[in-house]
Structures are given as C-alpha cells and as structure tokens.
Image: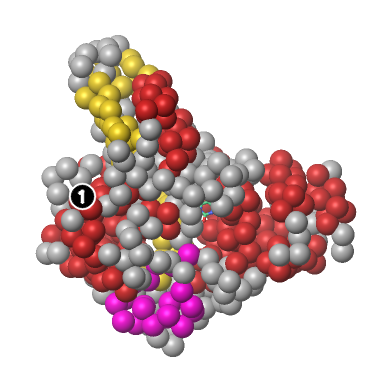
Amino acid sequence: MRATEIIEKKRDGGELSAAEIDWFIQSVTAGSLPDYQAAALLMAIYIRGMTRRETVDLTQAMARSGDQLDLHDVVPYAVDKHSSGGVGDKTSLVVLPLVAACGVPVAKMSGRGLGFSGGTLDKMESISGWNGAMSLARFKQQVVEIGLVLAGQTAELAPADGKLYALRDVTGTVSSIPLIAASIMSKKLAAGSDGIVLDVKLGRGAFMTTLDSARELATTMVNIGRDAGRDVVALLSDMNQPLGHAVGNSLEVREAIDALLGEETTPADFWAHCLEVAGHMLVLAGAAPSLEEGKRLAAAARDDGRAFEKFRQMVAAQGGDVDQVDHPDRLPHAPLSAVIESTRAGYIGEINASQIGWSCVYLGAGRAKKGDPIDLAVGMIFSRKVGDHLQVGDPLGRVYARDGESLARAVAEFKKSITYSETPVEPLPLFYGMVGGKEG
Ligand code: URA
C-alpha cells in the first residue's frame, strides 16, 4: 500500500477500508511511516472525520498494535477510568487509590499531556523516580500485590497510541471524535479491565465544547467497549473552568495529595467530582449496590487513611520517592511566583479554561514540540469559581514560573481569562448526565 494514496483518499472524504487502517497502524507501530505522513493522515481524519465502522477498525487496530492483557488469571474483575482531557484534571491521582482502597483491583493505562490538557503520566513524574513504564508481567504482578497499577504506553501495550498521541499533541489534531475515541478505547481494551468509567469533559477547557459532541464521543466509546464485552459508563462532566484549583504538574500532585489526606483546602468541586467517578467504578465492580453507597465507601477510604496509604504503596512500587508524598513541599517548585488579585468588583461570569491550559503549556508545563522536556514545577493556582463574588483586591490565585518574562506573560493571560459580570451568575454544574452503565 502507498501512504500517499491513503492520505489522499481521506483528504478527499473517502472511507478507509479495514486493511488500509491496519496498514497505517502497523506502519506507525513499526516506525516505517515518517511522522510527516502520519501527521498528514491525522489531519485528514481530523477534518473529514470517520464513519462508525472506520472508528471501530481504528480502535481495534491500535489495541492490537501491542499485546492485549487478560487479567482474569490474576483478578476476577478489574476497573479502570479515563478522562477525555481537561484543565486541572488530576482526578485519576485520587480516584484510583480511593477505589483500590475499597478492595477493587484497579489497572490503568494513562497518557501524557495533550494539547492544552495535562496528562497523568507527566503529573506523576513530578515525584522523583516514579516510573509508568513496565513490562506486562510487572503490570499484572502489581495488580495482584497492591491492587493498583498506573502505567503508560509501552512497546507492549497499545504502542500505536503512544506514537500517534505524541504527534497529535503538537499538530493541532487532538479534538477529533474518532481520534480521541480510538486513543482512549485502544488503551482501555489493551489494559484488560472489565469495568471502565469514562469521564467525558465538555466546555471551553475540553476537546468537546458542546453537550451534543460530548454525548457523541461518549456514545462512540461506550459502544466500542460494549462490543468488546466490557462494562462501560461515560459521565458527561463540566470543563468550562479548571477542575479544582491547581493547573500544572507538581501543583496538581500536591492538590491530589491534599485531597487524599482530606485537607480542608481541598477544592469542593474536585472532591465531589472524584467521589462521583469513584462511586461509579465501585458500582461497576459490584462493590457497591448504588452510586450513593459507592460514594460513601470511597469517602470512608479517605477518612481512615486507607486511600492515602494505597497511593503511597503505588508510588513506592513504581520507584517513586515516598518522602515527597509525605512531604509535598519537597515536590519540584518554581523559583518565581506572583499573587493575582481582582482588579474589579463583581461576579465571575466566565473563566476561559483552554486559555489557562495553553498559558500553562507556554509556561513550560506542556510540550510545544514532540519530545520537548516539560517543566514540572510551573503552573497556576486558580482559586475562584464561576459565580464567586469578588471585591477589588481579593485574591484570585497565583502563577508559578521559571523566569521573569514568562511570569509576566502568564500573569497577563491569567487576568485575561476571567470575564466579570455585574449581576449574579449561577455556579456551573459538575455533571450533565451519563451514557451507558452495566448491562444485564
Ligand atoms: N486521552 C487520551 O488518552 N487520548 C485522547 O485522545 C484524549 C484524552
């Protein structure tokens, strides 16, 4: 097959055959397709879209690009979760230990930052020595030993996603329903969990900006999972403002640790979001008869310290420095910071979450080019929410930067991302609904 013919076919709105999709994915995996041709096809898919059949074929080809794990020889039922990407979304860091601490095995494959959205692997690497790369044997062994494993793509698990993901991150080809669905579901199918909770974000800080497009993405992924015999539920959640307060790798790890410790400073929206996702995971696994009971069990696992201990165990098992978990002030911290105060009185009408996400990328918290190193320490704390009332001089948050120039630019962008209203504004909802659930 010839790459240019496949690219031209999709560019002109054609439907790719299963064989063409397979060839593309195999060539990407083998490294025989140059990045410029892979990126051209990604852009053609981004612009032209894919039929349901093409999306399923793409997902399956990506899942087959490495091994596909069956965990049933080690655990009867494992659960996983995945977010479609947002700003300040450090949910996995809290939810996975909450669920594992309730006795339900959790086996997750995560990604790195993508476009303006942060990635769990990058965040976890704020902890010195922590490593998401592991063999499949080790992945399984850790599920058995501590009931919680958090890995990235390897040469063995969904390697095609690892390569395409890195290209999409820097080629403006992220927010495409077939590409997101295939990326997420290929990892979920390869990692072998039986129950999957998908957190599909919508709004300005998400790749799907409308409820309709988020529902379409959710339905596509739920159907792919069900066809593969998995229990899948997709939550439609708000991403019109950063989730919690922290945006930026080590800042988010710190906020997650605070949440696991039940610190009073834990943002209410973030904790409520974590409980909802954890509750659904426990229901899927049959560990809770209802969402309310699932949430209660998850909260109890935090209150008595089991979830924090589970996080420590996972960090230690994956080579991380537990001392930084016990003393989060030892996590990487930026040399410069500036407090941002409100310059006017009024209600917060809007917070442009994607602008915040991009500002953090420019600060160094994400990548401008494939393979760029990231700065784990920089980012923003955005401590106000849509609907909050402010007086002139009230603190809005803080920016953390590596040098004076990037600090000044980020401070200006932070301020620009807020729109004020003279009249009261309703707080944003956390969730808009769900798709799927356990069948039978
Ligand atoms: N998360 C992923 O793993 N892939 C995407 O494309 C978006 C979010």
Q: Which residues are magenta?
A: 134-152
Image quadrant containing the N terminus: bottom right
Which x, y percent locates residue 63? 61, 69
Mark 1 highlights which residue?
329
Which x, y percent locates residue 22? 74, 66
Q: Residue furthest bottom?
A: 73
Which x, y percent locates residue 243? 34, 41
Q: Which residue is found at the position 54% from the left and 69% from the top?
A: 154
Residue 153 visible in rendering:
yes
Q: Which residue is found at the position 49% from the left and 79% from the top?
A: 136
Q: Is residue 92 magenta?
A: no
Q: Is residue 141 magenta?
A: yes
Residue 427 visible in rendering:
no
Q: Which residue is found at the position 27% from the left and 52% from the top?
A: 331
Q: Nearer the viewer, residue 307 or 372?
A: 372
How many numbered discs sit on the rendered protein? 1
Numbered disc 1: secondary structure: helix
Which x, y percent locates residue 251? 30, 45
Image quadrant containing the C terminus: bottom left
> In the displayed structure, does residue 23 sit left or right of residue 105?
right
Q: Nearer the viewer, residue 47 or 37?
A: 37
Q: Is disc 1's CB within 8 Å of ligand 1? A: no
> In the displayed structure, does residue 130 sit left or right of residue 58?
left
Vertical relation: 273 (above or below) 320: above
Vertical relation: 424 (above or below) 224: above
How busy is the neighbourhood of tag 1: few (under 14 within 10 Å), some, or many (20 plus)?
A: few
Say what amino acid the circle numbered 1 marks: Asp
Q: Which picture quadrant has residue 107?
A: bottom left
Q: Which picture quadrant has residue 79?
A: bottom left
